[in-house]
Amino acid sequence: MTDAPTDDNPTDSPPATHRPLVVLDKVNKHFGDLHVLKDIDLTIGEGEVVVVIGPSGSGKSTLCRTINRLETFETGTIEIDGVALPDEGKELARLRADVGMVFQSFNLFAHKTIRENLTLGPIKVRGLGVDKANERATQLLERVGITEQADKYPAQLSGGQQQRVAIARALAMDPKVMLFDEPTSALDPEMINEVLDVMTGLAKDGMTMVVVTHEMGFARRAANRVVFMSGGQIVEESTPQEFFTNPRSDRAKDFLSKILTH
Amino acid sequence: MDAITQNLDLFWNGFLRSLTICLWGGVGSLVLGTFIATCRVAPVAPLRTFGTAWVTVIRNCPLSVLLFMFAFGLPEIGINAEYYYFGLAALIIYTSAFVCEGLRAGINSVSAGQAEAARAIGLTFTQTLTQIVLPQAFRTSIPPVGSVIIAMFKNSAVVGAFGVGLDLYSVGESLTSAQGFAALPVLTGVAIGYLMITLPAGVGLGVLERKVAIAR
């Protein structure tokens, strides 16, 4: 088994010790006339943390959302743990249960308590008993540092707390891989770290993660691999060390010069 | 006032009959309206077409025409029932189109992110709708759908005029035309009867709205 990146991306990505978990092959997507994803090839190994960065409009969020088919795509294939993404329906729902997703705007269920947010999926999708689901919810809330808010509603929590709950909600499904779509972009600055700390902890525990973010500190600290996107293409992928100190493409150099100067 | 006091039991029975029509009409049009609204937002194109066609046709037909079709048209093609059931069915179908649109306003007010998050944890379309979207949509739909339901309570008088018999409107009609009581007091009595249904309904809706309000 190999997860070597495709030939047109000669990179120094981590050695092929990971079992491939998410495999994108020649994925193309248009929004009307706009070609947002151009022949995307990307393989994410089990336990790997891949950070996707790039200028806004580069297609990185779309890429993230395509992996669990919240966005459809026209050509190419996406496999998760060896299974190609099916069309919308029960099969896809089952596959999505294995892919955790954390959104920029948290999207906690507004009419349900924090605890119910965590137990809904396990009960309705996994068929877990209420007691088991509650027990697990308590553990997960502890893990993300939200202990006394279980019976509150999302709107009663701060942004940082809501996002940590959203991470716990995704974890409650025991996902094989977690997708983070700019998880800290909607947060006040003082709340960013509490969320990144939880994510760093997850990465350390071996969770497979795809993280779209502008947090370069997190990329350096937690990523195995940085994927740089621009204009709907993967322009460069390498280790964080390599990417931040020695970017090869002009577009990456230009991007880094803009974000790292202040 | 004699017209009312002398016929109090007639009025009371008419009130009960009208109340029954209102309750069944309310339940029926809410259920049917929810179903049609579900069709209109379903990921299946034929269902959406059906929902849109339903609303377009039903909403743009006068209630009286629908009632005529049910009461006089259906027996022509061999479907027979009491006027009461024909009237109720027409009222429910007519109201369902408006309930559907009120609900759809509520559904559209639920942010797309709520449904995305639901799908992302593996809920199916039906589960997403029943667990996440509709419960939130109902809350925002209470004022518009409530107005539709109150309008339906009043429309039950039109159903009465089509010969359901024994409802409030029919009581008024028979007292004035058949028994020769003065119109003004009798119709005042009828109006009071309808207000006894619609006013508490309005208060109830206000209470319901406050009770299920959620911070967002």
Image (spheres, rainbow, N blue to C red):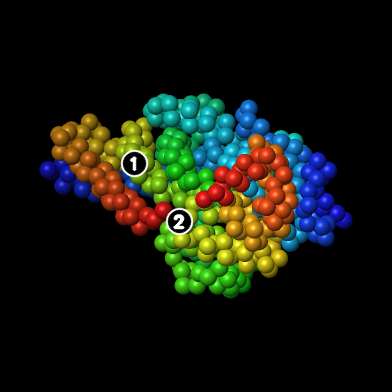
Q: Which mark identifies residue A188?
A: 2
Quadrant showing the N terminus of chain B: top left
User: Residue, x 75% and y 37% (percent of image)?
Assistant: A39
The amino acid beneath tag 2 is Asp
- Estimate how packed mark 2 is, as few (under 14), some (14 to 19) or many (20 or more) residues with alpha carbons within 10 Å: few
Q: Secondary structure at mark 1?
A: helix
- Residue B198 percent across, percent down from the top left: 28, 45
The amino acid beneath tag 1 is Ser
Q: Secondary structure at mark 2?
A: loop
Relative horizontal placement of residue A152, taking residue A197 as reference (left or right): left
The image quadrant of residue B71 is top left
Relative horizontal placement of residue B109, taking residue A214 as reference (left or right): left
Do the residues under discs 1 and 2 have CB atoms within 8 angstroms? no
Q: Which residue is mark 1?
A: B147
- Residue A190 percent across, percent down from the top left: 46, 61
Judge by depth and name the residue closer to the eye, A98 or B51.
A98
Image height check: is A172 above or below B143?
below
Q: Chain of mark 2?
A: A
- Estimate how packed mark 1 is, as few (under 14), some (14 to 19) or many (20 or more) residues with alpha carbons within 10 Å: some
Image height check: is A190 above or below B112?
below
User: Residue, x 76% and y 59% (percent of image)?
Assistant: A46
Judge by depth and name the residue closer to the eye, A141 or A89.
A141
- Residue A74 percent across, percent down from the top left: 71, 35
User: Residue, x 43% and y 30% (percent of image)?
Assistant: B59
Q: Residue furthest left?
A: B1
Marks 1 and 2 sit apart, C-alpha to C-alpha, by 41 Å
**Is any part of residue B87 visible from this angle?**
yes
- Residue A262 percent across, percent down from the top left: 52, 50
Q: Which mark identifies residue B186?
A: none
Relative horizontal placement of residue A89, taking residue B97 as reference (left or right): right
Q: Chain of mark 1?
A: B
